[in-house]
Image (cartoon, rainbow, N blue to C red):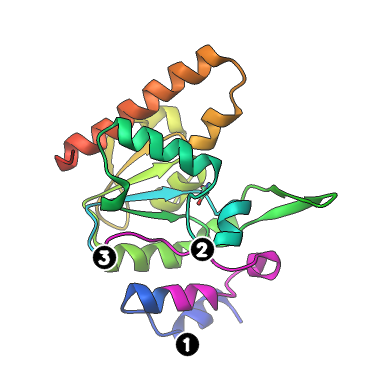
Amino acid sequence: MSLFEQQLREETPRSLKALREAENACRRCDLYKHATQAVPGEGPAHAPLMLIGEQPGNDEDLDGHPFVGPAGRMLDKALQEAGIDRKDVFVTNAVKHFKHEMRGKRRLHKRPDPGEIDACRWWQHIERELVKPKLMVALGATAARSAFERVVTINKVRGKIVPVPAGGNALVTIHPSYLLRLQEQRDKQREYVRFVADLEVARDFLRMG
Ligand code: URA
């Protein structure tokens, strides 16, 4: 069945609860086959700010909630520093199932490919339709591709409020796991400060904090 045919058959979920169930039944790409569960977005039903990550990691796949692992702790710290309360934010991912490869007994994160990101955008559009955020923050290249519907060079648009094709505005910044990968403490600190500054742009746009 083509994506278009599946779309015609599906009923568009009209609540976040229905959306969660539909995402868990999703067969739009093959990622569901090796994941424990879909990890739906979560947060206030009409949050002004929607944060979009890449995809659930190992911890999120097991837990069923977005950004609960090491990248989530980094994100929470930066949000707090930027004066944004995570409780006021709808936190989601561009891709709802964990993509990974086995290395021995370990499940190693694998970046979703363009087809998987594009297939999952269907859910992203419904989330936006239901939550109607005033601003989206795309964390990293996968989230930016999902929001802008094309490849985005992060450094070209980073930290600016930019309109997205489906309507509304987004700000692109790095993914918090980038900070975890940096080896040098000096680089980590510099990039962390830039990340917080990007989140502050979002805060000021929404007059949060
Ligand atoms: N990284 C993401 O992009 N999303 C999560 O939920 C966790 C880690």
Q: Is residue 113 visible?
A: no
SS at circle 1: helix
The CB of the residue at mark 2 lies under 8 Å from ligand 1: yes
**Numbered label tally:** 3
Residue 38 occupies quadrant: bottom right
Residue furthest to the top:
186
Q: Residue at x 18, y 38 (%)?
A: 209
Q: Secondary structure at mark 2?
A: loop
- Residue 137: x and y in percent read 34, 44
The residue under the point 45% across, 34% down is 174
Q: Is residue 35 located in the magenta-colored stretch of the structure?
A: yes
**Magenta run includes residue 209:** no
Verify CB contact (< 8 Å) between mark 1 and mark 2: no
Between marks 3 and 2, how big is the CA–CA gap?
16 Å
Tell me whether circle 3 and circle 1 mark residues in contact (CB < 8 Å).
no
**Residues marked 3 and 2 touching at CB (< 8 Å):** no
Judge the density around disc 2: few (<14), some (14-19), many (≥20) Cα neighbours within 10 Å: many
Q: Which residue is mark 1?
A: 9
Judging by the rendered image, the residue that carries numbered circle 3 is 45
Q: Nearer the viewer, residue 19 or 36?
A: 36
Q: Which residues are magenta?
A: 20-44
Neighbour tally class for label 3: few under 14, some 14-19, many 20 plus, Cα within 10 Å? some
Query: Three-letter amino acid code at disc 2?
Result: Val
Secondary element under disc 3, as helix, strand or loop, is: loop
- Write the residue at 46% across / 64% down: 40
- Position of residue 59 relative to residue 32, above or below, is above
Q: Which residue is mark 2?
A: 39
Q: Amino acid at mark 1?
A: Arg
First reached walking from the N terminus: tag 1 or tag 2: 1
Please, is residue 163 above or below residue 33 in the view? above
Tell me the quarter of the image containing the N terminus: bottom right
